[in-house]
Image (cartoon, rainbow, N blue to C red):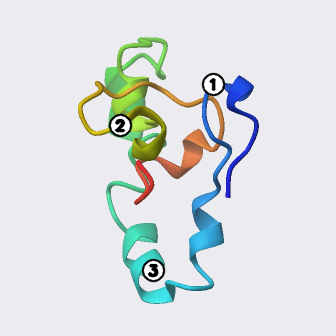
């Protein structure tokens, strides 16, 4: 499932994985990866993510969009989901 690539990222919502993969989704939902973007320590250290260099690792684009060799790039949608299995 994807969205308009003009958004700067595929508009994939990690919650769409929950129906087919409930156990894996539950593990992710309680993980640090899920909270990578909203983590209060990250927000404080990055001046509430004013430091744009932090976002590519805390809200990365899906790996299938960029490829394995590419450096992470930030996505513009679903940032609150942090690092999902898609990224």
Which residue position is annotated with label 3? 26
At x 40%, y 60%, the residue is 85
Q: Secondary structure at mark 2?
A: loop
Q: In the depicted view, which residue is nearer to us: 71 or 59?
A: 71
x and y percent of residue 28 in the render? 40, 69
- Marks 1 and 2, Cα distance to the nearest angstrom? 15 Å
Query: Which residue in the structure is indicated by mark 2?
Result: 67
Q: Secondary structure at mark 3?
A: helix
Q: Residue at x 64, y 56 (%)?
A: 13
The quadrant holding residue 54 is top left
Residue 11, position as x, y percentages in the image: 68, 44
- Give the image quarter of residue 37: top left
* Distance between the alpha carbons at the discs numbered 3 and 2: 26 Å
5 left or right, relative to 44: right
Residue 68 in the image: state x and y as whole percent: 27, 39
Tell me which numbered mark, 3 or 2, is placed earlier along the sequence: 3
45 on left or right of 24: left
Label 3 CA crowd tier, 10 Å (few <14, some 14–19, many 20+) = few
């Amino acid at each position: 499932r994807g969205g308009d690539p003009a958004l700067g990222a595929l508009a994939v919502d990690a919650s769409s994985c929950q129906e087919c993969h409930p156990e894996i989704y539950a593990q992710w939902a309680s993980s640090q990866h899920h909270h990578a973007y909203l983590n209060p320590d990250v927000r404080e250290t990055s001046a509430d993510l004013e430091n744009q260099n932090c976002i590519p690792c805390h809200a990365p684009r899906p790996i299938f969009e960029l490829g394995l060799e590419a450096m992470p790039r930030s996505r513009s949608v679903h940032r609150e989901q942090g690092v999902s299995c898609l990224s």
